[in-house]
Amino acid sequence: MARILLTSGPTRQYLDPVRYITNASSGRMGAAIAQAAIKLGHQVEIVSGPVAIEYPSEARVVQVITTEEMHQQVSVKFPDCDCLIGVAAPCDYMPRRVLDHKLTKTGEPLHLELIETVDIIASMGAQKSAGQYVVGFALETEDRRFRAINKMQRKCCDLIVSNSESAIDSQSNSIEILAPGGETVALAEGSKLEVAQVIMRVIEERFLQSNPTAKHES
């Protein structure tokens, strides 16, 4: 048994006390991977942004709101885990300044200055130790394969799962799993649970079954 840490769902970056930037990530892919991992006998912990779906009752879930909060929780939990799977779609940008009062309409254009948020998967990939593995997700709208490979190498991932925008808030998914050398490890299409089972089978076969340093080995 291995200890698997998942990030799942979207994050929110507030502009003022009531408005925020986010995306349409539902958390369904994260829930499906958690279910598949639990079925294989692994211990699962999920750091999730705001979602309406339910995660498997066997998983330990930590709820967060912002990308910074997700990063903080993952930073604390990752050292005790064997594998991090970054399924979440955290906001890549945040307002440089967050107002403490609600913005009032003035009839004039509103100009927002946005800065990049911390890259959670890249930061964990850079500090993983021997026997730890990081699996990323890449959702791209063009040049999917090229961008996924580039992202995997830049973030020091051991595998990356490439999918498209059609996966957002959907019941199904179509993915390609890529290794650092650029080779295709597996293809999968179907319900998110079916796809999750393929992803977990690849992760288990490549990393977990032969890992003698697993932190929660049975």
Image: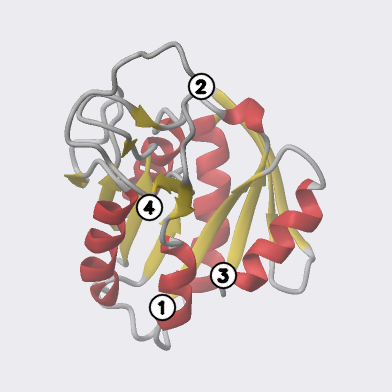
Which quadrant holds residue 209?
bottom left
Of the 4 image quadrants, the one containing the N terminus is bottom left
Q: Disc 3 on helix, strand or loop?
A: loop
The alpha-carbon separation of the residues under discs 4 and 2 comes to 53 Å
- The residue that label 2 is drawn on is 109
Which quadrant holds residue 211?
bottom left
- The label nearer to you, 2 versus 1, is 2
- The residue that label 3 is drawn on is 155
Please tell me which of labels 4 and 2 falls first in the chain. 4
- The residue that label 1 is drawn on is 132
149 on left or right of 55: right
Callout 4–callout 2 Cβ contact below 8 Å: no
Q: Where 135 sits versus 145, above or below?
A: below
Residue at image position (37%, 52%) is: 40
Question: In terms of depth relative to the viewer, which is nearer, 59 or 40?
Answer: 59
Residue at image position (27%, 69%) is: 75
Q: Disc 1 on helix, strand or loop?
A: loop
Q: Which three-letter amino acid code belongs to the residue tagged 3?
A: Lys
In the rendering, at what x and y percent does residue 90 appear? 42, 46
Q: Disc 4 on helix, strand or loop?
A: loop
Please tell me which of labels 1 and 4 falls first in the chain. 4
Q: Which three-letter amino acid code belongs to the residue tagged 2?
A: Pro
Q: Where 218 sits versus 177, above or below?
A: below
The alpha-carbon separation of the residues under discs 2 and 1 comes to 48 Å
Q: Do we see residue 190 in this rendering? A: no
Tell me, for residue 12, which label it has, or none: none
In the rendering, at what x and y percent does residue 112 appear? 46, 37
Residue at image position (41%, 32%) is: 22
- Few, some or many C-alpha atoms within 10 Å of disc 3 (few <14, some 14-19, many ≥20)? many
Q: Do we see residue 132 in this rendering? A: yes
